[in-house]
Image: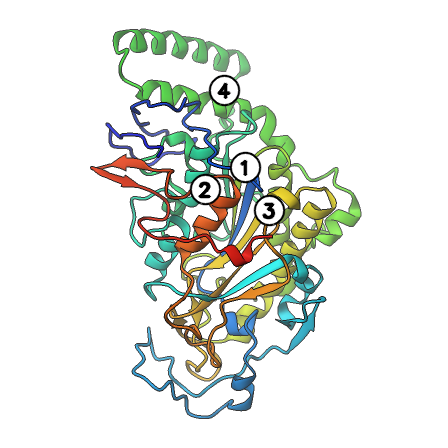
Amino acid sequence: MIHRRNFLAQGSAGLGSLALAMMLHEDSQAQTGGSIQVLHHPPRAKRVVQLFMSGAASHVDLWDHKPMLEKRHGEKSDFGEQVEAFQNGLGPWMKSPFAFSPYGESGKMLSEVVAPLGACVDDMAFIHNMVGKTGVHSQATYLQATGFDRPGFPGMGSWISYGLGSANDNLPTFVVLPDHRGFASNGPKNWGSAFLPASSQGTAIFPQRENPIEDLYARSNYVTNTGDKAGLELLARLNEQHRAQRPRDSRLEARIRSYELAAKMQRSAPAALDISNEPQHILKMYGLDRPGATYPSEINRAEEAEYFGRKCLIARRLLERGVRFVQIWSGNDNGFPRRNWDSHEDIERDHGPLAHGMAVGTAALIKDLKQRGLLDDTIVLWTTEFGRMPSTQGSKGRDHNPYVFTNWLCGGGIRGGVSHGPSDQWGYKPLDRDNPTQVYDVHATILHLLGIDHRKLTVRNEGIDRRLTDVHGHVIEKLLA
């Protein structure tokens, strides 16, 4: 078992606000740059990209076709048991406003709004019996992102960064591409390092902004190259004096490493984010063939495709440069008019553009990784915090459904063209209620494919050996190729 003991409390961190790092008790594993670089068995994958739909994407309107809802549309919903709704979403049964059709050799039924992914469906493995613990966005988002439904725990990307280390010392190991309109529930806490070393946290990049990485460059016009160099030299001397007086305090060393990474990123990050030399057919595939386009104030498909597609293309460029974990977010927290997946009022209005934009970018990413030979050792994970009810809220919306929802995986040792764990005829709960799939199982499976036994990668914090999967989790063997 691999574990480290935490002696110092750690605060929040980032390139702009550098936090305290941990002092770690060394055992038989060598530590390099805040990671332990350990494999328990031969890996199938080297890197992960997670696509997170903030606000709760509806499984029954995207991936989980329910003919019974079409047959009983408009009838009074009868779940056969007491149902605890989040708001008032126990109206009549509601069929999807989107048509479903079969795709691929597997004949997987997909909604028309995710039709671009039809070409990739035989590489994808769907999990339709995911269950959560809560219908509250913040807690459910924490659970999917960190394995715990409360703050104070590292994100999955931080665990992977800590366990595998960097494949490129000039770029962060864990990069986050938030929605350009704002953060999802919990904001940066979803990708914080908590009690892991500060170097394992996610670095947020906003590709659509003039300054994609905060505090990477000095923006003041009075800062000169000469003055900047002199300031850094003075800082280096002061740091050496401070470090010589406190040889057992690791906090300064952690800050120095963070600044050194920032300096390296000044040279490497701009090249990774610059898509101007990408071929036109690649830009078109990602939905980026309308430079300078303007969009209406209403949510629309072309805008969603451009913004999500850009993040997917940046993700590919980061992955091929050695970034271990890239997290892409769609949707901001509780914005009105809706710019997230929390479609209480109108599924067709909100999910239509968001799903289409997501599908364009995601399909391009999968195809691009595949044609470059990267999909074989890259895991793509699609998730959301919970699903939505098969009954109506109002006349067009759907309430929260933490009782069942869908994830899917692709690449990196995943067996494609399969669907695992069906939901019931309504898409309300798992068909087999005694054997649902939980987030711990998905996390355990991803770590397994990366060569890590989820039970052995632990860190002692506050007297407990913590791990990504808490005390749960089973590798989903049926999804392995």
Dot 3 lies on which element? Answer: loop
Q: Nearer the viewer, residue 460 or 101?
A: 460
**Nearer to us: label 2 or label 3:** 3
- Expressed as whole percent of the image width and height from the top left, the position of residue 106 reads 67, 67
Q: Quadrant of the N terminus?
A: top left
Q: Which is more toward the observer, 341 or 152? A: 152
Of label 4 and label 2, which has the lower sequence position?
2
Q: Earlier in the sequence, mark 1 or mark 4?
A: 1
Tell which of 388 and 470 is nearer to you.
Answer: 470
Real-space CA distance between mark 1 and mark 4, rounded to the nearest whole angstrom: 49 Å
Residue 209 lies in what quarter of the image? Answer: top right
278 displayed left or right of 405 = right
Say which label, 3 or 4, has the lower sequence index: 4
In the rendered image, the vertical position of residue 104 relative to residue 283, given as above or below = below
Which one is in front in this view, the residue at disc 4 or the one at disc 2? 2
Position of 345 relative to 369 (above/below): below
Q: Is residue 27 left or right of residue 302?
A: left
Instruction: Please name the residue that numbered disc 3 is placed on.
Output: 412
Instruction: Look at mark 4 in the image and give the residue it sits on.
Output: 223
Q: Position of residue 380 (x, y in %)?
A: 57, 50
* Residue drawn where x is 39% and y is 12% of the image: 235
Q: Which residue is mark 2?
A: 157
Pointer 1 or 2: first along the chain: 1
